[in-house]
Amino acid sequence: MGNFLFDDCVFSELTEEIIQSSDAFSCKNNDLDEFFNVDSFHYSRQLLGKTYCFRLAANVRKIVCAFTISNDSIRVDDLPNSRGKKIKSVVPREKSMRRFPGVLIGRLGVSQEFQGKGIGTELMDFIKSWFVVSNKTGCRFLIVDAYNDKNTLNYYESNGFKYLFSTENQEYLSIFREEETQGESLKTRLMYFDLIELTRFE
């Protein structure tokens, strides 16, 4: 079975020049559309993250998907005791580490034209393998602050991501530290994927 992104697309950094010379890129989410079309360049110039894309090889004006990554870490001291122990337990000599290196997937979107074709999963597989094969600085975890809606959370769950906090209320309290605010909905949920899982199959 072929891989559309590898077989039919070209990979590159998403630059302002590419956006300007391409057909309009939209993934049916106003926040994502504005980021990729406008804010990602400012983000890159401030050294806050890098945005990459796949374009259709037969027509490079069509951007198929894009994603933004930046350095991050999982800080064990910020997690509930049980979850912190779980993270520590998978890493040897955990007592000497209070945070574990990771990469944040800050934004990820598939063009409306190419949605529903499994490309989101292909893109996530690419990101995972990219950091396993080219792990130049040490990256143990992929981290995402996912939109707190059913479709987005289902996407990350189906791609092997787990919640950093076992409940939404627990995560809310870790951010706001106010008991009286519990029960309110979060806009996003923190999730992670342990890249060591992929090395076990090599």
Image: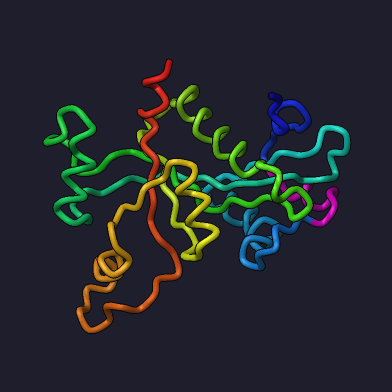
Figure label count: 0
Residue occupying the point 27% across, 73% down: 176
Task: Depth check: give the residue in front, 18 or 153.
Answer: 153
* Left or right of residue 22: residue 111: left
Q: As displayed, is residue 13 above or below residue 113?
A: above
Q: As displayed, is residue 194 above or below residue 198?
A: below
Residue occupying the point 76% across, 33% down: 9
Which residue is most to the bottom?
Answer: 180
Q: Position of residue 58 (x, y in %)?
A: 87, 33
Q: As displayed, is residue 165 above or below residue 90?
A: below
Q: As displayed, is residue 2 above or below residue 103?
A: above
Residue occupying the point 74% across, 58% down: 26
Q: Position of residue 120 (x, y in %)?
A: 62, 44
Colour scheme employed for the rendering of this structure: rainbow
Q: Quadrant of residue 86?
A: top left
Residue occupying the point 18% across, 56% down: 80
Task: Depth check: give the residue in front, 105 or 148.
Answer: 148
* Left or right of residue 62: residue 77: left
Indicate the quadrant containing the N terminus: top left, top right, bottom left or bottom right.
Answer: top right
* Left or right of residue 101: residue 47: right
Which residue is most to the top?
Answer: 202
Which residue is most to the left?
Answer: 95
Indicate the quadrant containing the C terminus: top left, top right, bottom left or bottom right.
Answer: top left
Q: Which residues are magenta?
A: 14-24
17 falls in the magenta region: yes
Q: Position of residue 142 (x, y in %)?
A: 42, 41
143 falls in the magenta region: no
